[in-house]
Amino acid sequence: MDGRRQHNFSERLVLVIATGGYLGYTPLASGTAGSLIGLLLLWPLDGIPHLLVTLLLAGGGVLVAGRAAEILGDHDPPVIIIDEIAGIAVATLLLPSHLLYRGAAFCLFRLFDTLKPFPSRHIERLSGGIGIMGDDLTAGLYSNLLIQVWRLF
């Protein structure tokens, strides 16, 4: 885990969820790995089930990410990837389970998550789970809106 101390069961559970089953400890591109696993897990969902899972990931993610940051003693540890999983859920919400749309959502989400357009940088500076999750949820929203507009034309 973080190498500083032993964690009790509830702390380990929080870390398992926050790190996407420890996938966040991937040495390179853990955010991309989190986005990809989220994309794959969400692929079969559409409509109401996708919306419910997205709400659960976003709301629960704020709590879990905030607690994981406390456990790890860091403001926004890179091993926390629940934010990327929730962000890709937002990015793919209401999109068909088609490779073109889901692939575009993935690419745009990673782009917006990296560039952090307004107000993502400001949201990222907030404390706790809101700061950890907020910029990724915003990136997901931007990605989704861009694809929805593209679909209109």
Image (cartoon, rainbow, N blue to C red):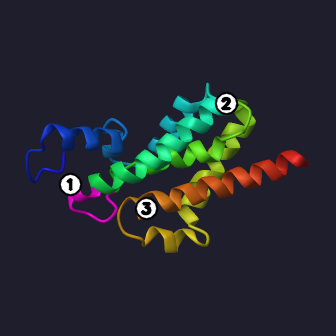
What is the distance, in whole Å, between disc 2 and disc 1 at their CAs?
Answer: 34 Å
Relative horizontal placement of residue 45, taking residue 130 as reference (left or right): right
Q: What residue type is labelled 1?
A: Ile
Q: Is mark 3 on a helix, strand or loop?
A: helix
Q: Does label 2 or label 3 sit earlier along the sequence?
A: 2
User: Residue 80 location, x and y as percent?
Assistant: 35, 50
Q: 88 or 13: which is nearer to us?
A: 13
Q: Quadrant of residue 114?
A: bottom right
- Locate the N terminus and report the quarter of the image it occupies: top left
Q: Mark 2 points at which residue?
A: 46
Within the magenta stretch, is there residue 115?
A: no
* Residue depicted at x 8% and y 45%: 6
> Which residue position holds label 1?
71
Residue 77, placed above or below residue 46: below
Give the amino acid at mark 2. Answer: Asp
Crowd rating for badge 1 (residues with CA inside 10 Å; few <14, some 14–19, many 20+): some
Query: What range of the chain is rendered magenta?
Result: 69-77
| Image coords of residue 29 (percent x, y) | 43, 49
Kindly identify which residue carries mark 3: 130
